[in-house]
Image (cartoon, rainbow, N blue to C red):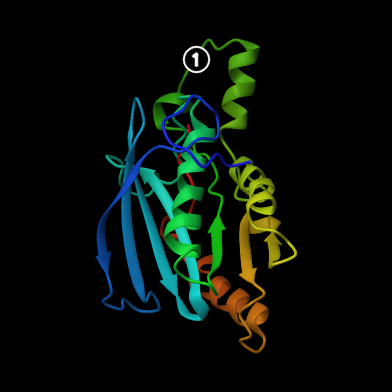
Protein backbone atom coordinates (compact mmCIF):
# COMPACT_ATOMS: atom_id res chain seq x y z
CA UNK A 1 0.00 0.00 0.00
CA UNK A 2 1.10 3.60 -0.52
CA UNK A 3 3.13 4.95 2.38
CA UNK A 4 1.91 8.28 3.75
CA UNK A 5 5.44 9.51 4.42
CA UNK A 6 8.21 11.01 2.32
CA UNK A 7 11.91 10.37 1.99
CA UNK A 8 11.92 7.18 4.04
CA UNK A 9 13.53 3.94 2.95
CA UNK A 10 10.18 2.25 2.43
CA UNK A 11 9.79 1.18 -1.21
CA UNK A 12 6.38 2.82 -1.55
CA UNK A 13 7.15 6.11 0.16
CA UNK A 14 6.91 9.10 -2.11
CA UNK A 15 9.37 11.84 -2.92
CA UNK A 16 8.64 15.41 -1.96
CA UNK A 17 6.99 17.27 -4.82
CA UNK A 18 6.02 20.86 -5.51
CA UNK A 19 3.52 22.62 -7.74
CA UNK A 20 5.25 24.81 -10.32
CA UNK A 21 2.32 26.03 -12.39
CA UNK A 22 -1.46 26.14 -12.82
CA UNK A 23 -3.19 27.10 -16.03
CA UNK A 24 -6.95 27.72 -15.79
CA UNK A 25 -7.18 28.95 -19.36
CA UNK A 26 -9.22 26.32 -21.23
CA UNK A 27 -7.34 24.69 -24.10
CA UNK A 28 -9.80 22.80 -26.22
CA UNK A 29 -11.38 20.14 -24.05
CA UNK A 30 -8.79 20.61 -21.27
CA UNK A 31 -10.25 22.83 -18.53
CA UNK A 32 -7.18 23.20 -16.33
CA UNK A 33 -3.57 22.04 -16.23
CA UNK A 34 -1.50 21.68 -13.05
CA UNK A 35 2.24 20.98 -13.22
CA UNK A 36 4.35 19.46 -10.43
CA UNK A 37 7.98 18.42 -10.20
CA UNK A 38 9.90 16.09 -7.93
CA UNK A 39 13.49 14.95 -7.68
CA UNK A 40 14.86 11.44 -7.17
CA UNK A 41 18.54 10.75 -6.36
CA UNK A 42 19.24 10.55 -10.10
CA UNK A 43 16.45 12.38 -11.96
CA UNK A 44 14.00 15.24 -12.03
CA UNK A 45 10.45 14.40 -13.10
CA UNK A 46 7.64 16.56 -14.42
CA UNK A 47 4.07 15.58 -13.52
CA UNK A 48 1.15 17.04 -15.46
CA UNK A 49 -2.45 16.76 -14.25
CA UNK A 50 -5.11 17.76 -16.77
CA UNK A 51 -8.75 18.37 -15.84
CA UNK A 52 -11.48 17.45 -18.33
CA UNK A 53 -15.28 17.64 -18.30
CA UNK A 54 -17.12 15.49 -15.74
CA UNK A 55 -14.29 16.16 -13.25
CA UNK A 56 -12.01 13.66 -14.96
CA UNK A 57 -8.33 14.16 -14.10
CA UNK A 58 -5.58 12.61 -16.20
CA UNK A 59 -2.05 12.36 -14.80
CA UNK A 60 0.98 11.94 -17.02
CA UNK A 61 4.66 12.28 -16.24
CA UNK A 62 8.08 12.11 -17.82
CA UNK A 63 11.69 13.01 -17.19
CA UNK A 64 12.03 16.76 -16.91
CA UNK A 65 14.73 16.97 -19.58
CA UNK A 66 13.00 14.69 -22.10
CA UNK A 67 10.92 15.88 -25.01
CA UNK A 68 9.52 14.78 -28.33
CA UNK A 69 7.55 11.71 -29.32
CA UNK A 70 9.36 9.25 -27.08
CA UNK A 71 9.31 11.13 -23.76
CA UNK A 72 6.49 8.97 -22.37
CA UNK A 73 8.07 5.72 -23.57
CA UNK A 74 11.47 5.86 -21.84
CA UNK A 75 12.59 3.34 -19.25
CA UNK A 76 15.36 4.56 -16.97
CA UNK A 77 16.44 1.30 -15.26
CA UNK A 78 17.00 3.25 -12.02
CA UNK A 79 15.19 0.54 -10.02
CA UNK A 80 13.14 3.34 -8.49
CA UNK A 81 9.71 2.72 -10.01
CA UNK A 82 7.85 2.08 -6.70
CA UNK A 83 8.76 5.47 -5.24
CA UNK A 84 8.18 7.29 -8.53
CA UNK A 85 4.72 5.74 -8.85
CA UNK A 86 4.01 6.40 -5.17
CA UNK A 87 4.80 10.08 -5.64
CA UNK A 88 2.28 10.31 -8.46
CA UNK A 89 -0.29 8.57 -6.26
CA UNK A 90 0.36 11.11 -3.50
CA UNK A 91 -0.39 13.90 -5.99
CA UNK A 92 -3.65 12.28 -7.08
CA UNK A 93 -4.80 11.55 -3.55
CA UNK A 94 -3.59 14.62 -1.65
CA UNK A 95 -3.80 17.32 -4.31
CA UNK A 96 -6.68 16.20 -6.51
CA UNK A 97 -8.96 13.72 -4.71
CA UNK A 98 -8.77 15.56 -1.38
CA UNK A 99 -9.81 18.84 -3.02
CA UNK A 100 -12.36 17.38 -5.48
CA UNK A 101 -14.90 15.08 -3.88
CA UNK A 102 -16.28 13.94 -7.25
CA UNK A 103 -12.94 13.51 -9.01
CA UNK A 104 -12.45 10.62 -11.42
CA UNK A 105 -9.17 9.58 -13.02
CA UNK A 106 -7.76 8.14 -16.22
CA UNK A 107 -4.45 7.06 -17.68
CA UNK A 108 -2.74 5.20 -20.48
CA UNK A 109 0.22 2.97 -19.66
CA UNK A 110 2.60 3.79 -22.47
CA UNK A 111 4.53 1.06 -24.20
CA UNK A 112 8.31 1.06 -23.84
CA UNK A 113 10.15 1.85 -27.06
CA UNK A 114 13.82 1.08 -27.50
CA UNK A 115 16.19 3.96 -28.31
CA UNK A 116 17.86 3.65 -31.69
CA UNK A 117 21.24 2.88 -30.14
CA UNK A 118 19.77 -0.10 -28.29
CA UNK A 119 18.01 -1.36 -31.39
CA UNK A 120 21.38 -1.52 -33.14
CA UNK A 121 23.17 -3.26 -30.27
CA UNK A 122 25.10 -6.37 -31.35
CA UNK A 123 26.77 -9.35 -29.68
CA UNK A 124 24.16 -9.58 -26.95
CA UNK A 125 23.87 -12.47 -24.54
CA UNK A 126 20.57 -14.42 -24.50
CA UNK A 127 19.60 -12.67 -21.27
CA UNK A 128 20.29 -9.27 -22.79
CA UNK A 129 18.23 -10.15 -25.86
CA UNK A 130 15.25 -11.15 -23.71
CA UNK A 131 15.58 -7.92 -21.76
CA UNK A 132 15.48 -5.88 -24.95
CA UNK A 133 12.45 -7.81 -26.17
CA UNK A 134 10.57 -6.91 -22.98
CA UNK A 135 11.43 -3.27 -23.54
CA UNK A 136 10.14 -3.14 -27.10
CA UNK A 137 6.38 -3.38 -26.58
CA UNK A 138 3.23 -2.98 -28.59
CA UNK A 139 0.48 -0.71 -27.21
CA UNK A 140 -1.60 -3.66 -25.99
CA UNK A 141 -1.51 -4.70 -22.33
CA UNK A 142 1.80 -2.98 -21.59
CA UNK A 143 3.91 -3.62 -18.52
CA UNK A 144 3.11 -0.15 -17.18
CA UNK A 145 -0.60 -0.75 -17.74
CA UNK A 146 -0.50 -4.02 -15.78
CA UNK A 147 1.38 -2.45 -12.87
CA UNK A 148 -0.82 0.64 -12.69
CA UNK A 149 -4.02 -1.41 -13.03
CA UNK A 150 -3.14 -3.52 -10.00
CA UNK A 151 -2.16 -0.46 -8.00
CA UNK A 152 -5.32 1.43 -8.98
CA UNK A 153 -7.54 -1.24 -7.43
CA UNK A 154 -5.60 -0.95 -4.18
CA UNK A 155 -5.62 2.83 -4.02
CA UNK A 156 -9.17 3.42 -5.34
CA UNK A 157 -11.61 1.06 -3.65
CA UNK A 158 -13.90 -0.66 -6.23
CA UNK A 159 -16.71 -0.12 -3.74
CA UNK A 160 -16.42 3.60 -4.45
CA UNK A 161 -15.13 3.68 -8.03
CA UNK A 162 -15.95 2.03 -11.34
CA UNK A 163 -12.77 0.52 -12.80
CA UNK A 164 -12.88 0.34 -16.60
CA UNK A 165 -10.01 -1.37 -18.40
CA UNK A 166 -9.27 -1.18 -22.11
CA UNK A 167 -6.53 -3.79 -22.48
CA UNK A 168 -5.95 -3.43 -26.26
CA UNK A 169 -5.14 0.27 -25.79
CA UNK A 170 -3.65 -0.06 -22.27
CA UNK A 171 -6.04 2.61 -21.03
CA UNK A 172 -7.78 2.74 -17.66
CA UNK A 173 -10.61 4.81 -16.19
CA UNK A 174 -11.37 5.17 -12.48
CA UNK A 175 -14.82 6.76 -12.22
CA UNK A 176 -16.19 8.13 -8.97
CA UNK A 177 -19.52 6.60 -7.93
CA UNK A 178 -20.39 9.78 -6.01
CA UNK A 179 -20.66 11.61 -9.32
CA UNK A 180 -24.35 11.32 -10.25
CA UNK A 181 -23.91 12.63 -13.79
CA UNK A 182 -26.36 10.59 -15.93
CA UNK A 183 -24.55 7.95 -18.02
CA UNK A 184 -21.21 9.02 -16.55
CA UNK A 185 -19.43 5.83 -17.57
CA UNK A 186 -20.45 5.99 -21.21
CA UNK A 187 -19.88 9.75 -21.49
CA UNK A 188 -16.37 9.67 -20.04
CA UNK A 189 -15.41 6.51 -21.93
CA UNK A 190 -16.52 8.07 -25.23
CA UNK A 191 -14.72 11.34 -24.49
CA UNK A 192 -11.54 9.50 -23.54
CA UNK A 193 -11.65 7.38 -26.69
CA UNK A 194 -12.37 10.25 -29.04
CA UNK A 195 -9.79 12.60 -27.56
CA UNK A 196 -6.95 10.15 -27.01
CA UNK A 197 -7.36 6.70 -28.49
CA UNK A 198 -8.10 8.08 -31.95
CA UNK A 199 -5.28 10.60 -31.76
CA UNK A 200 -1.57 10.39 -32.46
CA UNK A 201 0.39 8.28 -29.92
CA UNK A 202 2.69 11.10 -28.87
CA UNK A 203 -0.30 13.12 -27.61
CA UNK A 204 -1.60 10.35 -25.33
CA UNK A 205 -1.86 11.08 -21.62
CA UNK A 206 0.43 8.66 -19.92
CA UNK A 207 1.76 7.58 -16.63
CA UNK A 208 5.10 6.58 -17.98
CA UNK A 209 8.86 6.88 -17.73
CA UNK A 210 9.18 4.76 -14.61
CA UNK A 211 12.50 3.66 -13.18
Residue 184, by quadrant, is bottom right
63 sits to left or right of 185: left
* Residue nearest the viewer, comparing 172 with 204: 172
Q: Which residue is rendered at x = 55% and y = 63% of the image?
A: 106
* Residue nearest the viewer, comparing 16 with 185: 16
Q: Is residue 92 above or below residue 126?
A: below
Q: Which residue is rendered at x = 47% and y = 80% of the image?
A: 53
Q: Which residue is rendered at x = 55% and y = 64% of the image?
A: 105
Q: Is residue 205 visible?
A: no
Q: Which residue is rendered at x = 67% and y = 86% of the image?
A: 183
**Picture coordinates of residue 8 (x, y %)?**
46, 28
Residue 209, by quadrant, is top left
Q: Is residue 206 above or below residue 15?
A: below
Q: Is residue 2 visible?
A: yes
Q: Give the labeled residue for mark 1.
A: 122
Q: Secondary structure at mark 1?
A: loop
Q: Is residue 33 above or below residue 20?
A: below
**Picture coordinates of residue 83 (x, y %)?**
49, 34
Q: Is residue 35 above or below residue 188?
A: above
35 sits to left or right of 199: left
78 sits to left or right of 128: left
Amino acid sequence: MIDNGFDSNAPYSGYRYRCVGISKQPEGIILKTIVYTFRTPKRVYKVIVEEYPYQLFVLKFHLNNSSGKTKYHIQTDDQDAPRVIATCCHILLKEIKFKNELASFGFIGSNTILPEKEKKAEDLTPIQKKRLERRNESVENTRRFRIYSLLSKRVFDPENYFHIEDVPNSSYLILNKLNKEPDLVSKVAQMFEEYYLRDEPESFPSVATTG
